[in-house]
Image (cartoon, rainbow, N blue to C red):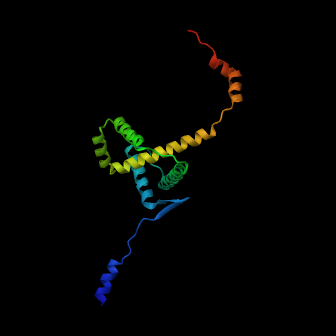
Amino acid sequence: LSSSLLVSNLYAAEQPLDRVAAIVDNDVVMNSQYQARLKEVQQTISKRNVEQLEESVLRQQVMERLILDAIHLQIAERSGISISDEELAESMATIAERNGLTQREFEKALTADGLTLQDAQEQVRQEMLISRVRQYRVSERIQVTDQEVQNFLASDLGKMQLAEEYE
C-alpha cells in the first residue's frame, strides 16, 4: 500500500507551468515571454559591446516594453489593423536582402539564433502592427487648417521657402 501511494505521489507531483508576469487590459504577459525577451536583449547588448545597464533597470525596461507592445497590439486588433501575408513575406525578404542572405541562408541564420521561421515571422508581424498603430496615432493628432497654411505662407519663413533661387 505504501509503495502504491509513493508511486501515485510521484505522478501527482506539482509541475510548474508558466506564470503571469503582467496583466494588460484583456491580455497577459507571461513570465516565459518576459524571460525570453530579457535574454534576447541581454544577448543583443553583449553582441554590440554596449555598456551594460544595471540589472534592475534592464528588467524594468524590458517589462515596460512588453506592456507597451501588448497595448499597441490590442489597439491594432480593435482598430482592425492587420498585416497581409504578402506584406509579411515582402518584409521578410527585405530583411534577408539587407543582411545579404538568400531566403535559405536567412532561415539557417534564424535557426542558428534559436528561432524558427514562424517565430521570426510572428515577431516581424507584431513589429509591423505596432509600427502601423504608432503611425495612425500620430497622423490622427496632426491637423493643419487652411488658416494655418495661409499664415505660414504669409510669414517670412513661408515667403523665403517659396522665393525663387538663382545661381
In the figure, is residue 26 to the left or right of 88? Answer: right
Q: From the viewer's perspective, is residue 54 above or below residue 19?
A: above
The count of marks equals 0
Residue lying furthest top:
167
Instruction: Give the percent coordinates (x, y) of residue 111.
Output: 30, 49
Q: Which quarter of the figure is the C terminus placed in?
A: top right
Q: Nearer the viewer, residue 67 or 150?
A: 150
Q: Nearer the viewer, residue 121 or 159?
A: 121
Q: Quadrant of residue 150?
A: top right
Q: From the viewer's perspective, is residue 146 above or below residue 9?
A: above
Instruction: Give the percent coordinates (x, y) of residue 85.
Output: 40, 44
Q: Nearer the viewer, residue 42 or 92?
A: 92
Q: From the viewer's perspective, is residue 5 above or below residue 11?
A: below
Q: Which quarter of the figure is the N terminus placed in?
A: bottom left
Residue occupying the point 48% across, 63% down: 20
Instruction: Give the percent coordinates (x, y) of residue 36.
Output: 41, 55
Residue lying furthest bottom:
1
Q: Quadrant of residue 107?
A: top left
Q: Nearer the viewer, residue 129 or 70?
A: 129
In the figure, is residue 58 to the left or right of 143? Answer: left
Residue occupying the point 33% across, 50% down: 116
